[in-house]
Image: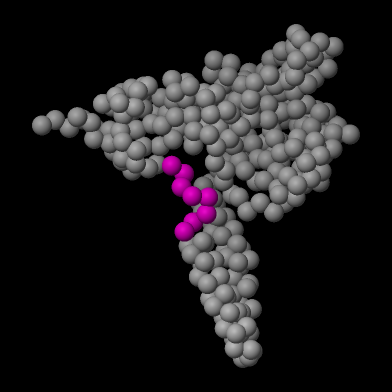
């Protein structure tokens, strides 16, 4: 029999999972696309694809240690906010019903009211400390050079970027969410494809992986169509070291045709006039986003007896 050791959702290791339909990436493709297949092959661990929940190799739900990325916020953050909120509510209720305002109670009310923003500042400092432990080497950082009339904002030009690091190509969107694509290994991105329309006008750039999989796209007018755009495109090609080619669209259909990580996805939402979404981007406390799960992977050991 097999004894589960650990498990994880393959979708957690797929950068474009948040924008893909639930069944866009089949189970057989997910391990190779995320690099899990290469990792298991290098470790000498056989990989079995299970299509039936009743298969003996399929573990029960919750079996084994979860290797997911964890919660977006640490437990101490929510614990501090919950404790401060409870104290504030108890003191406020006491003040209202007793019809008195003792100075020390008012001071404690003010202190607990400020606990939420203080916890947020502490969380940011804690996050910076943790991320600072990784000594990354940034070879190039490309910011957008949008053409006029594309609806770009100051925040878009300031916060979105493409970083070419020593081992990864990283996309950062308006919310600060980062999408990491490997530059080495069997699952690494392999090429940049400039897409032009039938008239020869640039439409965008596709970031492709093994098997010509389109992993992400960059709308040309938003990234390379304006001042500094040509220089950014040249620096991206030079630093990434990927194969560069050109593809001409044959029809009048929309580009990109299939669901894909469109960077920056959120700018298009704002540009379409959804003001509520634009405001939400400015207030969002999210530091990591979830997404549809492409499948589950379980590691187990054989037990005989």
Magenta-drawn stretch, dominant element (helix, strand or loop): loop
Q: Which residue corresponds to the image point at 52% horizontal and 72% vertical from the top-left?
A: 86
Q: Residue furthest left?
A: 305
> Is any atom of residue 145 visible in this view?
no
User: Is residue 193 at all visible to an observer of this figure?
Assistant: yes
Q: Using residue 122 as the reference point, say whether residue 185 is left or right of it.
A: left
Q: Quadrant of residue 237?
A: top right
Q: Quadrant of residue 149?
A: top right
Camera-side residue of 88 and 228: 88
Q: Position of residue 269 (x, y in %)?
A: 74, 37
Q: Is residue 266 above or below residue 254?
A: below
Q: Nearer the viewer, residue 293 or 208?
A: 293
Residue 216 position (above or below residue 88): above
Query: Where is residue 244 shown, x and y percent of the image?
Result: 67, 18
Q: Quadrant of the C terminus?
A: top left
Image quadrant holding the N terminus, namely top left
Span highlighted in magenta in the image: 68-75
Residue at the image position 54 percent from the left and 15 percent from the top: 211
122 or 99, which lies in front? Answer: 99
The colour scheme of the drawn protein is: one colour
Q: Position of residue 239 (x, y in %)?
A: 65, 30
Magenta span contains residue 90: no
196, above or below 88, in the image = above
- In the displayed structure, 297 sits above or below 64; it is above
Q: Which residue is located at x 75 percent, y 47 percent?
A: 276
Outermost residue, top direction?
250
């Amino acid at each position: 029999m097999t004894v589960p050791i650990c498990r994880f959702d393959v979708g957690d290791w797929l950068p474009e999972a948040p924008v893909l339909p639930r069944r866009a990436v089949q189970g057989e493709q997910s391990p190779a696309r995320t690099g899990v297949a290469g990792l298991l092959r290098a470790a000498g661990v056989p990989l079995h694809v299970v299509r039936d929940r009743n298969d003996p190799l399929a573990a029960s739900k919750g079996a084994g240690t979860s290797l997911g990325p964890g919660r977006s916020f640490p437990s101490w953050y929510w614990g501090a906010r919950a404790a401060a909120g409870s104290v504030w509510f108890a003191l406020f209720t006491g003040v209202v019903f007793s019809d008195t305002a003792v100075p020390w109670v008012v001071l404690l009310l003010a202190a607990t009211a400020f606990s939420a923003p203080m916890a947020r500042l502490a969380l940011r400092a804690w996050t910076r400390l943790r991320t600072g432990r990784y000594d990354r080497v940034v070879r190039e950082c490309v910011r957008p050079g949008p053409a006029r009339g594309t609806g770009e904002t100051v925040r878009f030009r300031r916060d979105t970027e493409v970083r070419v690091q020593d081992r990864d190509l990283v996309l950062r969107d308006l919310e600060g969410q980062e999408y990491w694509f490997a530059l080495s290994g069997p699952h690494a991105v392999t090429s940049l494809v400039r897409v032009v329309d039938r008239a020869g006008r640039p439409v965008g750039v596709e970031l492709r992986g093994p098997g010509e999989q389109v992993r992400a796209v960059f709308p040309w007018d938003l990234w390379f169509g304006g001042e500094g755009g040509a220089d950014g495109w040249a620096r991206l090609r030079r630093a990434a070291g990927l194969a560069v080619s050109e593809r001409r669209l044959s029809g009048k259909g929309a580009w990109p045709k299939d669901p894909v990580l469109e960077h920056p996805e959120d700018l298009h939402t704002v540009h379409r006039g959804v003001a509520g979404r634009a405001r939400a981007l400015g207030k969002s406390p999210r530091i990591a986003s979830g997404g549809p799960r492409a499948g589950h992977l379980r590691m187990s050991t054989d037990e005989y007896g």
